[in-house]
Image (tube, rainbow, N blue to C red):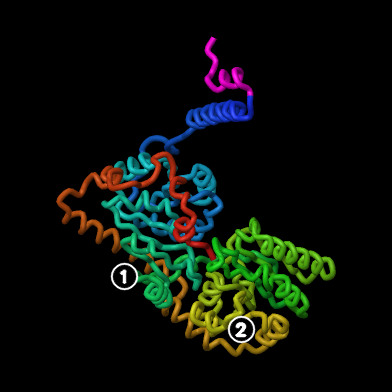
Amino acid sequence: MYVPVTVSNFLRSPNRGTAAAMANAVRNKQRARRRLARAANRVDREPPGPAPAAEVIVYFADDPRKLYQLDQWLPVLAELHKRHQVLIALRKMDSLLDLRARTFIPSVYVRRLADLLELYDELEPKVAIYVNNGVANFQSLAVSTMLHVHVNHGESDKVSMVSNQAKSYDRVFVAGEAAERRHAAALIDFDQRKLVRVGRPQLDLTFPPQLPPTTRRTVMYAPTWEGENDFNNYTSVDVYGPAIVSQLLDLPDVRLVYRPHPRVLTSTDPGVAAGHQEILRLLEAADRRDPGAGHTSSMEGNTLALFGHADAMVTDVSSIGLDFLYLRTEKPLFIADRRNDRDLLAVDAPISAACDVIDAGTIATLGATVAARLDSDQRLSSRQELRQFYFGDLAPGESTERFLAAVSEVIAQRDRLIQGMAHPHGGSSAAAAAGDLGDDDSPASFQGHGALASAGETAQD
């Protein structure tokens, strides 16, 4: 009877070393069996068979936790789909299953790099759109017969809004002058001609009321999350969150709506998690004292749907503040500064010039300041100027038209370039030989290097 070498060695000489070797061999065998079981159940493409024709690929390689980055673009992409056929290509099956319930836009899951390139060879799309800087984007970026457009998933003054990976794309769609200056200040040897101003198409949507009507004035507190690292941490939840909420709850004739970034809810940062729970406790206590006040937390639905209710916004350096500036320019805006550095804040976040800043020196009087601004807003003209700086003179509705026209122009430019190529076909297949694009099995192969992953992932605001 055959006896494995590790078992034989243990029987001849039972000691700690041979026992460890035998245990390791057993674990390896178990891992091999699990790998075989997973391989038997793997689906390389879903749905199987030919994909619907598409001029535009929207590429999304992340898991459902980051689908919020794509969600805000879906109504805009639906408009694009009316002009140019769109297909959303996903690299995680769970993301495909989640997305199907959210949009009628055709979508397909492709597991391996080979499956992705086969899809591109089959469809010969003209443009690929990317809503984040995930490092797995580079598997798609290797294809030379498309033009690649980065659109991001927000507009804010966060450090993560500008990545050196912008150099990899053929076009980078931005909101306005502020974004252009951000790229010029942060990147060396970057071709500014890649930048295309399109405003904020996601803000052209209209939403039905999400909260019940009230005679009270509504103040939103919408903090961001802690980011992937300290330099991209702008959240106020752990530093000022409970104090902000406590003072707003004490204001007469005010309804407070707490709307944190989705990743605050699942934060593993002890301070953020504790701050969030304390805020919820304060809201519950206030509701018990005065159920008619309508104080609430809002964790579901679109944040923009709450803006129509808000008479003032308290937030952090994030896209929420700029979105509010664009849509509700006439309403007061408050920005928290966890670093207590007004000079740095003025440079990093020009919007702060039109806001009351919450920091260690002002947190104690926040309630009184909010009450004063609700009664007499003295910063309206400054907000109007900064709206122009961030978004140009676009009115609601015009950004979508500019975006659609910009995509059409990129498609036309791609067609002109393809006509001038000596060998225009086979770009996707050739990409497989263009260099080391990572493990053919999965885009997860790109996640190994922490610094690269951090630099590549644009933190949502």
Q: Quadrant of residue 373?
A: bottom right
Q: Which quarter of the image is occupied by the N terminus?
A: top right
Q: Quadrant of residue 111?
A: top left
Tell me which residue sits at (42%, 49%) in the image.
Answer: 88
Check disc 1 and give the amino acid type.
Asp
Tell me which residue sits at (37%, 49%) in the image.
Answer: 139
Task: Pick whichever of labels 2 and 1 is earlier in the sequence.
Answer: 1
Tell me which residue sits at (48%, 69%) in the image.
Answer: 159
Residue extent of the magenta highlight: 1-14
Residue nearest the viewer, comparing 82 with 224: 224
Which residue is the site of mark 2?
356
Residue nearest the viewer, comparing 18 with 284: 18
Q: Position of residue 382 (x, y in %)?
A: 52, 87
The image's mark for residue 189 is 1
Residue 152 vs residue 55: left or right? right
Furthest-right residue in view? Answer: 289
Is residue 323 placed above or below 76 in the rendered structure? Answer: below
The image's mark for residue 288 is none
Q: Position of residue 371 (x, y in %)?
A: 70, 84
Residue nearest the viewer, comparing 271 with 64: 271
Check disc 2 and give the amino acid type.
Asp
| Residue at disc 2, secondary structure | strand
Is residue 357 placed above or below 198 in the rendered structure? Answer: below
Furthest-top residue in view? Answer: 1
Q: Position of residue 176 (x, y in %)?
A: 41, 75
Magenta stretch contains residue 91: no
Task: Estimate how packed mark 2 is, as few (under 14), some (14 to 19) or many (20 or more) residues with alpha carbons within 10 Å.
Answer: some
Label 2, label 1: how far apart the Cα atoms are: 36 Å
Magenta stretch contains residue 5: yes
| Residue at disc 1, secondary structure | loop
